[in-house]
Image: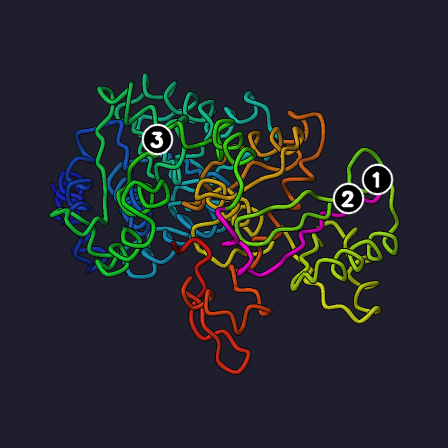
Amino acid sequence: MTPEASKLLLWKRDPVIFVREVFGAEPDEWQKDVLRAFPTNNRMAMKACKGPGKTTCLAWLAWNFMATRPNPKIAATSISGDNLSDGLWAEMAKWQNKSEFLKSEFSWTKTKIFNKDHYSTWFMSARTWPKTADTSRQADTLAGLHEDYILFILDEAGGIPLSVMAAAEAALSTGVESKIIMAGNPTHKEGPLYRACTNERHLWWVIEISSAPDDPKRTPRVSIEWAQQQIDKYGKNNPWVLVNVYGQFPPSSLNVLLSPEEITAAMGRKPIGDSYKYAQKRLGIDVARFGDDRTIIFPRQGLWAYNPVEMRNARSNEIAARVALAKSKWSSEMEFIDDTGGYGSGVIDSLIMAGQSPIGIHFAAKANDERYFNKRSEMWFEMAEWIKRGGCLPNIPELAAELAAPTYTFANGKFRLEKKDQIKDRLGFSPDYADALALTFAFPEMPNIQAENDPMVKYLGGGFDDNKLKYEYDPFAE
């Protein structure tokens, strides 16, 4: 056996040595466990917290397979083409550039990595599917590979359709060495990663990667301080913490934002005394142009959401006039208008021309809190927490149905509320009331400026200095 062949055989048997000698890197302890399990396991799954280096580990395994097997074929996919391009495919290029051996033997393109002397038989390809694809087209993503040495890699596997996995599993019955390896955050209670970690666990080699401060095997790539901050801030049983810190699946019951019982309770209660009066008065305005959708103007002050105003087939100037009237009569301090689809722009412009200062909110904009996928998700979750902590709702059947309808999932470890079109299809009407109320949570809660000289504000946790907020106001204190 030549020295070159001996070296390749050693790397095949011990991928840890491969990583050290080819890349000059030292794997973390959990990465060593994965690398050492790779030669003898055909089905491997990494269930991970946020940021432990799982994509790096996938890239190491892919390069090991490419370098130490004759004429291998590797197919890689992820939850989206952008995710694959920005994640695993970029990681492949990064590690190739650290190795003179790999740079001399292989060429990297945006969709294919191949052996320079065996372009058509020795390669790794990037596979994606259209977002609108049906199950048969999804299955085609990993179909069509036949070779003695085959490896399928599924990155961010929590959201990959089962049909894609089925195509990969069909190839395990052929060839000399056929493998599937996947990695992802435990964001979905369905799909390939969930099955591998639960009812199909006997078929898979599974590793669970955590950043929990008290876990002796925690990943060192996530700071203990950050992990502890998330636990202290949101609680160890919070689903976002479970996914991103502990690397655990959230309870299935939590994919519903609000239960009917919680909504009914909120509609049957009133604030205690005048506790709500020290909060800022806000209007949430969900604008609809024409058709079945409604324009809703929803007033809220602290724990009390008042009866909203409903308008149908109203023009921008008419809606603006009604908002101005509500502001004048009720002395609201902030007016939040949905400016997502452009319908709200006319209302905003009309109010500005009238000397008002409305705030346009784009539901698809970035959230202030990193836990949330977008602004809409953030506002709805803040609203749900407000209801659970004592918020008082008007008794409106349509509002109750709208609040109970949405579910949520995780997108790259972030809470994502179900899309509005999906909610509308299920309800038969748009969740206009709930969206309008949610808009009143666009900014953090603040005290009513009119209560500047009232000693009760300070008692509740607020304070002023020259008409400016001095202390953070807590409407739920006492």
User: Front-most of 250 and 27?
Assistant: 250
Label 1 sits on residue: 312
Residue for point 65% across, 64% down? 333
Q: Rounded to the nearest whole Å, what is the CA distance between mark 3 and mark 1? A: 40 Å
Q: Rounded to the nearest whole Å, what is the CA distance between mark 2 and mark 3? A: 36 Å
- The image position of residue 255, as x and y in percent, is 45, 32
Colouring convention used in this rendered image of the protein = rainbow
Task: Classify 10 Å Cα crowding around label 1: few (below 14), some (14-19), many (20 and above).
Answer: some
Contact (Cβ within 8 Å) of mark 1 with mark 2: yes
Q: Which residues are magenta?
A: 272-290
Q: Rounded to the nearest whole Å, what is the CA distance between mark 1 and mark 2? A: 6 Å
Residue 357 in magenta stretch: no
Q: Is residue 217 left or right of residue 99?
A: left
Outermost bottom residue: 466
Residue for point 37% across, 45% down? 115
Residue for point 47% across, 28% down? 161
Residue for point 45% across, 72% down? 463
Label 3 sits on residue: 251
The image quarter containing residue 325 is: bottom right
- The image position of residue 384, as x and y in percent, is 50, 41
